Image (spheres, rainbow, N blue to C red):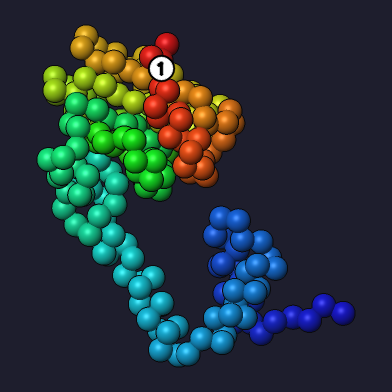
Amino acid sequence: MEIKLPDAMERLAARLRKLPGVGSQTAQRHAWEFLRWKEGDLQALAQELSHLHEHVVPCPVCGFYTNGGTCQICSSPLRDHSQICVVETAPQVPVIERTGCYHGLYHVLGGRFSPLSGITPEQLRWEALRKRLADPKVTEMILATSTDVEGQATAKLLLDDFQREGLAITRLAIGVPTGADLSYADTPSLALALNGRQKFS
């Protein structure tokens, strides 16, 4: 006999299942864990979640997230402002930063080119990238999109659209498995890919 959880716990588990990698059993375990929490801790968590979009906003320059205003990477004089590493989503920025071998700037597209899903350059931060690349001080665009079909299509479209004299367009090389989502790449593999990047054609 399958025991039905109380309605509130079922609803909570259903929401938790929306998290990546969380199946039905894991969601139920988390729901049981929350039931053990003190009321004050639950209220603090609820408050943090309710204010998340208010307190975490995109950087107006690169699209990474910050408390407000320009992010610490874009505003740092220690970064190499001649390089822009293009990623699909904001969580990929800390993954690359952990390698410790990239010191340039970033540009978060906010997704990837996927015509079958209705995602075109107009739905991405494409024109913002065009404006940044118009600066002659930018001499390299690193394509750090994922190596699956949509990531490759995005990289090819970036290559075709943004070629100009004085701009080297490179692509992450060995180290990132084909078909992998960059968000889950391990740090050593990503470091190899960054250090061994090649001209993209």
Res 93 quadrant in image: top left
Compared with 175, 77 (above or below) is below
Res 125 quadrant in image: top left
Q: Residue at x 28, y 59 (%)?
A: 56
- Quarter that holds the N terminus: bottom right
Q: Quick one: label 1, few (<14), some, or many (20+) residues within 10 Å?
A: some
Number of numbered discs: 1
Q: Residue at x 18, y 31 (%)?
A: 81
Compared with 85, 8 (above or below) is below
Q: Which residue is mark 1?
A: 198
Q: Residue at x 19, y 32 (%)?
A: 80
Q: Is residue 119 visible?
A: no
- Quarter that holds the C terminus: top left
Seen as rendered, the residue at the extreme right is 1
Closer-to-camera residue (157/177): 177
Compared with 187, 170 (above or below) is above
Compared with 139, 126 (above or below) is below
Q: Say which element carries label 1.
A: strand
Rendering coords of residue 162 (x, y %): 29, 18
Closer-to-camera residue (53/38): 38
Q: On the picture, is 145 further left or further right than 79?
A: right
Res 143 quadrant in image: top left
Q: Is residue 173 visible?
A: yes
Rendering coords of residue 154 (x, y %): 44, 26
Q: Amino acid at mark 1?
A: Gln
Rendering coords of residue 115 (x, y %): 49, 29
Q: On the picture, is 35 further left or further right than 156?
A: right
